Image (cartoon, coloured by chain):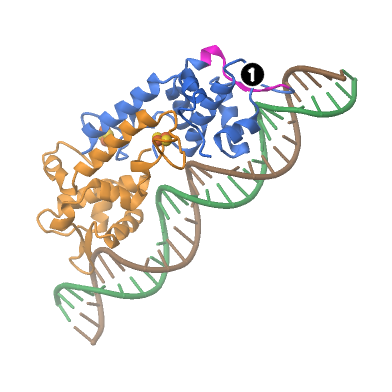
Chain colours: A blue, B orange, C green, D brown
Amino acid sequence: MVFSKTCEYAIRAVIYVAQKSEDGAKVGIKEIAAGIDSPVHFIAKILQDLSKREIVQSTKGPNGGFYIDKDSRKKSLADIVTAIDGDRIFTGCGLGLKNCSESKPCPLHSEFKIIRDKIKLTLHSATIGDFNASLNAGLSFIKER
Amino acid sequence: MVFSKTCEYAIRAVIYVAQKSEDGAKVGIKEIAAGIDSPVHFIAKILQDLSKREIVQSTKGPNGGFYIDKDSRKKSLADIVTAIDGDRIFTGCGLGLKNCSESKPCPLHSEFKIIRDKIKLTLHSATIGDFNASLNAGLSFIKER
DNA sequence: CTTGTAAAAGATAAAAAACTCTTTTATTTA
DNA sequence: TAAATAAAAGAGTTTTTTATCTTTTACAAG
Ligand code: FES
Ligand code: FES
């Protein structure tokens, strides 16, 4: 839960590309799919989308591939989530009411707001480039095997 | 996100029935659907399921309907969520890795664990019967209009 | 300027989730 | 015990999400 499958792949792919293109290299779609353990064509679609939204960059043809430029590295994980899943996770009601509000709160509102705000903070604080070191050092992973 | 639509309906329905059957009354499926603003047949299916799992009780025939007995009122919202969505929200990886673990954590693991634990605590602490007073007093709501 | 490469775009398919409809079973009451 | 009522059960449809396949476009190098 929390994120759609599409969004989970998206975050993992972006983090992967950020790490692999840190030195300016470009990363091919097959390598990305293998690197994050996702369906090739599916992650291709997702990256196409993120490319249009300028969260990742790409070039076609020989030596082409995906990469992430200096500016995009500063973007937050929240930008990825918003691009893929919209802002429901940041603003929506935990019990599915159409409008979350203080004036007509659901029974879980006050508790849920704390959770939602923590998610918001976490995703807004973390930038795309933040994970390279930890991945390089083998302290965290974005695929199973 | 966080919960499936089915689960959102389930929680709202259970809270609604708990409130309406506090005095021992039984609540019909149409009233429930109207009370939480959900599709009648859909919530019927959900309650059937929760009934088999003994989270709600029901009787057929005239004067029949759904209600929640004293024991079930003590159950937690986590019991509802587990029954409908399983335990992924409590144990799964935020980035969709098949196994969330300390030994092979995803880059968001430590942050995500805080969020997950807060969700866990919130849902385990709140019992089904906890919201009657607030609903009765008009301080919280489980439908929009 | 042709050939090979790699992403973009578009179309399609499979699976899961959300929702609906019909029939059956249990229960009450007249 | 027959009729009415209301949930249970089962089957079916629609929509959304996830995933795949094919064709086109862009680019680089020989
Ligand atoms: S109204 Fe439900 S979370 Fe705010
Ligand atoms: S491994 Fe991702 S949350 Fe634990």
Q: Is residue A52 visible?
A: no
In terms of image quadrants, where is residue A61?
A: top right
Q: Is the residue indicated by label 1 positioned so its CB lies within 8 Å of ligand 2?
A: no
Q: Quadrant of ligand 1?
A: top left
Q: Chain of mark 1?
A: A
Give the magenta-colored segment's residue range: A63-72
Residue D30, x across and y down, in percent: 87, 20
**Label 1, on which residue?**
A25
Residue A40, x across and y down, in percent: 62, 37
Single out the residue that lies furthest toward the top: A70
Give the secondary structure at mark 1.
loop
- Residue at image location 24% in from the left, 39% down from the top: B121
Q: Quadrant of the C terminus of chain B?
A: top left
- Residue at image location 26% in from the left, 57% down from the top: B29
Q: Is residue B47 above or below residue A32?
A: below
In terms of image quadrants, where is residue B119?
A: top left
Q: Quadrant of the N terminus of chain B?
A: top left
Front in this rendered view, residue A38 or D6: A38
Is residue B29 found inside the magenta-colored segment of the image?
no
Q: Is residue D5 above or below residue A35?
A: below
Q: Amino acid at mark 1?
A: Ala
Front in this rendered view, residue A74 or B73: A74
